[in-house]
Amino acid sequence: MDWLKINEEGEVEFVADEVKLVRQVQPLLTLAYNKGTKGDMDGRERKRAKQELKYLFLAYSFKSPYKDYNEAERLHEAKLDCNFPTSWQESTELKALIPQFTKGTENKVMKMLQTVHRFMDKFEVHLNGLDLEERDKGGSYINSPREVIATLEKLPRLAETLQELENQAKLGVVIKSSSRGDQELGWMNKDNNYGKRKAIDSTGESSDSD
């Protein structure tokens, strides 16, 4: 099941209100978590949560435009897109949500695909670090050029396997909206009354979120 989507304005939305029931999501929506954010000092607009959920989508979703990047590049691009400072780090609350998000949005094929991608990331680092001129004390090549070439010749077959897994994963995540027409409910949609409810901060005090 999808949890998040990016609308035409580049803002994050929940695909369905039910996602807000996930206990790891709820701390990000409290006033206490969002207070003090630039342009949202009282936290009522949940700007911090929106930006961090956007980061979550870009960095960890299979539907992210950066899904084919290695992990370091993917996280870097997600931070840039969210305009986070270089010193920004994932909060404790966000770190707790990440494994729940990936588990909840990936089917078995996607999990297998992620495993293959992690292997490929490590393999890429390994290849980039190879020194084909390095020799041992006896003068023999430490990294046999012939074996390296033989390995590289197998990469097209691996690429085909990855493409097939991706096709299967995409088929597995297609869902139909149960809302009116083609509309999908999200926390910022007009039909969503979340913004009109009472927001409870971590002290237990309520405040209008309008």
Image (spheres, rainbow, N blue to C red):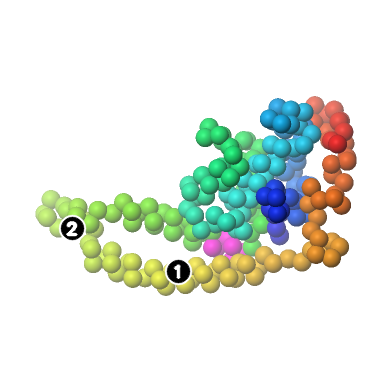
In this rendering, position of residue 157 left or right of residue 204: left
- Image location of residue 120, percent across then percent down: 44, 59
Residue 77 - label:
none
What secondary structure do most residues of the magenta stretch adopt? Answer: helix
Helix, strand or loop status at disc 1: helix
Helix, strand or loop status at disc 2: loop
Q: Visible in this render: residue 205?
A: yes
Q: How crowded is mark 1: few (under 14 residues within 10 Å), some or many (20 or more)?
A: few
Q: Quadrant of the C terminus?
A: top right
Q: Name the residue under label 1.
A: 159
Q: Looking at the image, is mark 1 or mark 2 earlier in the sequence?
A: 2
Q: Mark 2 points at which residue?
A: 141
Residue at point 39%, 57% (across, down): 123
In this rendering, position of residue 177 left or right of residue 145: right
Q: Give the range drawn in magenta.
A: 108-113
Residue at point 80%, 64% (across, down): 182
Q: What residue type is labelled 2?
A: Tyr
Of the pair 85 and 194, the residue shown nearer to us: 85
